[in-house]
Image (spheres, rainbow, N blue to C red):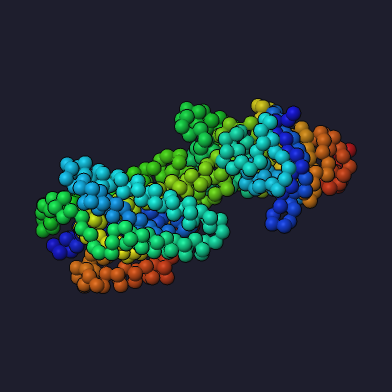
Amino acid sequence: MGAFLQYTVIGLTVGSFYALVALGYTIVYGIIRLINFAQGDLSMVGAFLGWTLLVSFGFQRLPLYLALIIAFVVPMLGTAAVNIVILQFAYKPLLRKSLLAILITALGMSLLLQNTAELIWGPSIQAYPPNLLPSTGFFMGPVHVTYVQLALVFVSLLLMGGMVLFVQGTTVGTAMRALAVDHDAARLMGINVDGIIRLAFVLGAMLAAASGVMLGLYYVQIQFTMGFLLGLRAFTAAVLGGIGNIPGAMAGGMLIGLLESYTTGYLSGSWKDVIVFGVLITVLIVKPTGLFGERVAERM
Amino acid sequence: MALLEIHDLHVYYGNIEALKGISLEADPGQIAAILGGNGAGKTTTLRTISGLLRPRSGSITYGGKSLIGMEAHLIVAMGLSHVPEGRRIFGILTVEENLNLGGYLIRSDRKLVSERKASAYALFPRLAERRTQLAGTLSGGEQQMLAIGRALMSGPKVLMLDEPSLGLSPILARSVLKTVRQIANQGTAVLLVEQNARQALAIADRAYVIEVGRVVLEGEAATLAGDERVQKAYLGGFEAVGTG
């Protein structure tokens, strides 16, 4: 039982990273029906930007709270800028043409980001400052929870909660949901559709970048290839929850994190991707709309 | 000079010429009806005015300013509002959220948004009863009311309506058109596309009859209602003859 709970804690921590990336997939998909395969690589870009600030620029020597604010906010903005450039130059010209062409382009963008990161930051593994965050924690019964785990999950939930409040509670968020249904009708409301698409790319990139920095802080090691599997797992999470569905992406991320953690704990770490992608295939066969996806019209 | 002037508008779908030189006008407080059969170009005309389609040539001027090439959302901001064919309400959003989106451009002025919502609810009390209901669950008539209410949220000077009576019972259709007359009487210029020529002519001031992309007849609504050709083609035989 103790082990089970311990795996649960780890699973929820990792799951919250996946959930952030999955949210990005889902927001973009909801609006332009694009699976943005570069989503995981945006997370990698965020991780490296954070690393550059903390290690190369030496911001790790600042007071901890200040270092963390910089290490989150600047990569989130920087990655958003990268995603806007990708949108304008790669996706926008194809937006009203072929969905397949834009999907292939997304795969291309994923590779482009990886190779550019390799050029800039090198092919070898880089390390986040290992002693930046305290490694202490506390026991909840038999379960050891570190303060870092608690903080990372808390920040993830905060970001996701902010996202939900924005989408559900503001007129601009309502416009995002309306775009999931009818672009032309949205234009007739005076909604700048291109502007909302840009906003979705900004938000998706910011969530991905935040998860990247968290991954760096949690696992310490980062590499230019880290976004690939992360992206696929988050995509699985989004599909599991019902792509286009915001609460679904969050729940899907947590479920994938838990599944991975239990597999690693009870079976072996090398089996986790077999299980995760097995789930993806099963969901696609049995319930393609995902756990939370109802009809297409209920998305977001 | 009219508030909205369309002159010699040519619109193509690929190589097919859908509008072959349409000219029409709309003035404040007046209803201009656009009549014609399926595929005549009525919807295309409205979609071109509201910026969803680009004309190949011709002019659209609103208050002396050209609307050609302007993006649809900016045209709404200029004061033109379009209730599209098939209503196109956002079914996954509530009635209230649909109205909020109609007021998207004035969203920072919360007071104005709630004032306009209040007048939409006053115009269509049925919507007020259903404000938290998903718009997709409304009846056809209620959806039409919502589509019109939503279009009024931006405070338009020109209101374009595409087949507002389509799919409604005769009683409901009459009541919707009566509301359209009320809206015009408050000073809005209305462009009304209708298949139901009799009811449209009854409330309109002017009318244009479009056939295969051209205006073939135009004039005072009352005159056109008495025109033999209009009676034959759009008002159906015996009743028009019977009532003289």
- Residue B36 in the image: state x and y as whole percent: 77, 47
Q: Nearer the viewer, residue A100 or B145?
A: A100
Q: Relative to B91, is A36 on the left or the right?
A: left
Q: Quadrant of residue A259?
A: bottom left
Residue at the (45%, 47%) spot, across then down: A198
Task: Answer whether residue B190 is visible to the viewer in this image.
Answer: no
Seen at 43% across and 43% down, the residue is A173
Quarter holding the N terminus of chain A? bottom left
Number of marks drawn: 0
Query: Is residue B55 visible to us here?
Result: yes
Residue A142 position, x and y percent, is 11, 58
Q: Position of residue A185 (x, y in %)?
A: 57, 46
Left or right position of B206 against B84: right
Residue in the picture at 79% in, 46% down: B214
Q: Nearer the viewer, residue A71 or B155?
A: A71
Residue B146 versus residue A106: which sits nearer the camera?
A106
The x, y position of residue B45, in whole percent, is 70, 45
Above or below B78: residue A244: below
Residue B45 shown left or right of residue A105 in the figure: right
Image height of B56 relative to A284, above or below: above
Q: Residue at x 16, y 60 (%)?
A: A6
